[in-house]
Image (spheres, grey):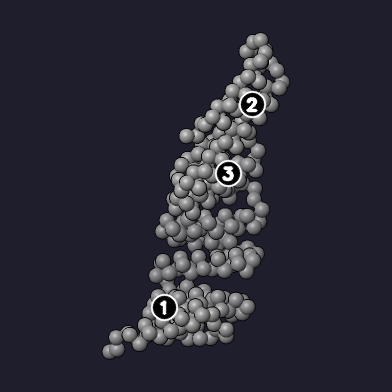
Amino acid sequence: MIFSIRNFLICLFFLSACFSDKTFFHFFKKESCEKKIKNFYKASREIFLDKAKTCLKENKPKQAVIILEHLLQRDKIQEVNFEQQKELTKELANKSFYYLKNYRKALKYYTALLKMPLKPREKISIQHYKAKSFYYLKKHSQALKEIEKNLTKELSIEERKKALLLKAEIFIAQNQFDKAGHLFQNQIESFPDQEDFFRENLAVIYESQKKFSMAIEELEKIEKPSSFVLKKIKRLKARKNNQPRF
């Protein structure tokens, strides 16, 4: 239950502090009352946050999200610090995405976050997950539109890799394998220091098209292949040999 003995004691302390004066009217005239209410709200807010964390530890993400949503509504009414509201909205977006896999709900909160003042790196990350939410909802054209917004920005190597991977996944979901292949082929030329990464992903696309020879060729171009890549080459050669011959 959300309200424990600890919660009750905090409420009791709050009431005794507020109503120590002779009359209810006199209490509301006191300047300290507003401060007491704010302190009480701050304490009760921590209780809700603790309870949400406990729910996650107990593998009850749905209850955690319900608590956080309730808290966000209270924050808006109480006009809590904007940064705290932003962090809570971010928590709700990420919990909905990762724990609940409720991409519609996640999309709602990522969209809300993008309307708030954000740092450049923060905005890129949120934009990415908004695109990914659209992707999982099978709204591929919207997902592509969102990821393109990021690709027009100055991205780090990791951010660019993530964005291009998602863009390729969108193309594959739309059965546009050639576009996905061209995407990675172009990146090999543009980012030679990331050649191995793009060749591995290009091989995945060729494999999905059952173009095993082309997939093998891409992987064999990797100068220092990992054990994973070597195993993959072996597996692809086996698949190629097992293909029916006409």
Q: CA distance from mark 3 to mark 2?
A: 21 Å
Which secondary structure, mark 2? helix
Q: Residues within 10 Å of mark 2 (few under 14, many from 20)?
A: some
Q: CA distance from mark 2 to mark 1?
A: 63 Å
Side of 145 relative to 14 (left or right): left
Q: Is residue 105 visible?
A: no
Q: Mark 2 near mark 1, Cβ–Cβ under 8 Å? A: no
| Quadrant that contains the C terminus | bottom left
Q: Which residue is mark 1?
A: 207
Q: Residues within 10 Å of mark 3 (few under 14, many from 20)?
A: some
Residue drawn at (39%, 77%) of the image = 209
- Quarter holding residue 245: bottom left
Q: Is residue 52 above or below residue 234?
A: above
Q: Which residue is mark 2?
A: 37
Give the amino acid type for the residue marked by disc 2 in the picture. Answer: Ile
Give the amino acid type for the residue marked by disc 3 in the picture. Answer: Leu
Q: Which residue is mark 3?
A: 88
Which secondary structure, mark 3? helix
Can you tell which of label 2 and label 1 is closer to the viewer? 2
For the view shown, which residue lies furthest in the left direction? Answer: 246
Q: Position of residue 206 (x, y in %)?
A: 43, 79
